[in-house]
Image: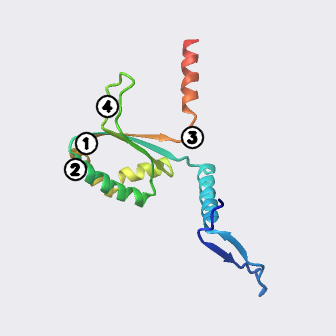
Amino acid sequence: MPCAPLMQVNWTVCEPDSDEESEPLSFDVRLLAVLWHAFWQALLKGGHQMTALNLSCATVKDPDLFSEYVRQAGDIMRDFGVEVVAKGNFAECVTETGLCPTVAAVFRYASLDMARSFFASEAYRALIPLRDKACDMTILLFEEGVDGIETVTADIHEREG
């Protein structure tokens, strides 16, 4: 069954320096939202700055304090336009790393500079004492889209060869 338009919009376009109107353009607002999102994604990816990913792993010491930290950090993240990519509870450790966090999450920032600005902000720095009481956290930043795995693999093969 085809989807009914969420909201139909009619646009009338006027030519510059003219009083004549064109035929109304009609479209679904969802289409406009998809196109707008695609435009910004292309602009961000095509620009000079790559997006950055933050992998945060935490071993929770106090669940109530941790919930409060997550709530307050989430408010600041919204102000910085941070996207939650994934989050989850620890299931099992496959490798012998010794890292067995209670929870982990991945966040996306518009750029590495934006991620650094977030962590350097007064608002986030004020949360650090709460974070440290609530959990032991490791925060890692990665540039998204960098072909690092192939670069590292090539370097290893070079040294072995």
Q: Do the residues labelled 2 and 4 touch (CB within 8 Å)?
A: no
In percent of width and height, residue 114 lies at: 46, 52
Residue 129 in view: no
- Please indicate whether residue 1 sits to the left or right of residue 14 in the image: left
- Please indicate whether residue 135 sits to the left or right of residue 77 in the image: left
Kindly give the residue lying farthest to the front in the view shown: 1
**Alpha carbon separation for disc pair 2 and 3:** 34 Å
**Alpha carbon separation for disc pair 4 and 1:** 13 Å
Residue with the mark numbered 4? 100
Residue with the mark numbered 2? 65
Numbered disc in front, either 1 or 3: 1
The N terminus sits in image quarter: bottom right
Residue with the mark numbered 3? 145
Q: Nearer the viewer, residue 1 or 106?
A: 1
| Element type at mark 2 | helix
| Element type at mark 3 | loop
Q: Nearer the viewer, residue 48 or 75?
A: 75
**Alpha carbon separation for disc pair 3 and 4:** 27 Å
Residue type, numbered disc 2: Leu
Residue type, numbered disc 4: Cys
In percent of width and height, residue 147 lies at: 58, 34
Residue with the mark numbered 1? 135
Comes first in the chain, label 2 or label 4:
2
- Could you classify mark 4 by the number of other residues whose Cα lies within 10 Å: few (under 14), some (14-19), or many (20 or more)? some
Please tell me which residue is depicted at 56% across the width and 38% down the height of the picture.
Answer: 146
